[in-house]
Image (tube, grey):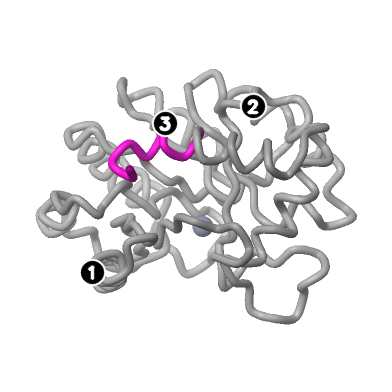
Amino acid sequence: MAAGVTRIIAVGVDLEHSRRALALAQRHPEVFAGVGHYPTEAAAPDIDALQALAGDERVVAIGEVGLDFQDAHAPDRDVQISRLDELFALAVELDLPVSIHNRNAAAEIAAAITAHPGLRGAMHYFALEWDWAERFLALGFCLSFAGLVTRPSRNALREVVKRMPADRLLLETDSPYGQSHQRMGMPNRPAYLLDTATLVAELRGISLEELAELERANALALFRKMT
Ligand SMILES: [Zn+2]
């Protein structure tokens, strides 16, 4: 709170963590939950169980879901794609936004989004260059930036932050991962979102207060149950 973070979405990576995220959201008014299934999970998602959890008023997103073609231990690509298809269908059915994890699978994710008209959401931990940013923006998606954008080598990512439409820009921590450059070597925390926000405000040429107002509006527009 002291860092100006007034609402948090805790996301689940499997059924157990989705339940825990929801339990956290039920205990703390400033916390909301996402229920999801991480693409590297060996087991298939339990769609019925996720659907039941998602009916709770504190669940504001289906996430984390996505494709991970980098992790050598992840299920085969076609298995991941068919699971994602089911999770996207669930999100459309429930009219919930998705939070998408992408590693080396941007083309396949764009194809999966296209196959589900009405799907909306955010590309979480966005790490790609303008060409891909443009593609996901054209699909109606928001781009969500973590501490990565503060790292010196990431000029292309800062370029995306500067060029993209303001109303699609989201911020996240991805804590305990996703450290900003100045916090490397320590676990990330929601409060450290301020590092990312400070740089993003500078890149956009707006004040931190203006960015806070923008982020609040963007988050509420996408995660509509988070009122
Ligand atoms: Zn992720």
Q: Quadrant of residue 150?
A: bottom right
Which mark lies nearer to you, 1 or 3? 3
Q: Residue at x 82, y 69 (%)?
A: 182
Q: Is mark 2 within 8 Å of ligand 1?
A: no
- The residue wearing badge 1 is 19
Side (left or right) of 96 relative to 219: left
Q: Residue at x 72, y 54 (%)?
A: 196
Q: Residue at x 12, y 59 (%)?
A: 49
Amino acid type, residue under disc 2 in the picture: Ala
Secondary structure state at the residue bearing disc 3: helix
- The residue wearing badge 2 is 166
Q: Quadrant of residue 118?
A: top left
Q: In terms of sequence position, does the residue under pointer 2 or pointer 3 come before the other?
A: 2
Amino acid type, residue under disc 1 in the picture: Arg
Residue closest to the far bottom = 186
- The residue wearing badge 3 is 221
Which mark lies nearer to you, 2 or 1? 2
Q: In terms of sequence position, does the residue under pointer 2 or pointer 1 come before the other?
A: 1
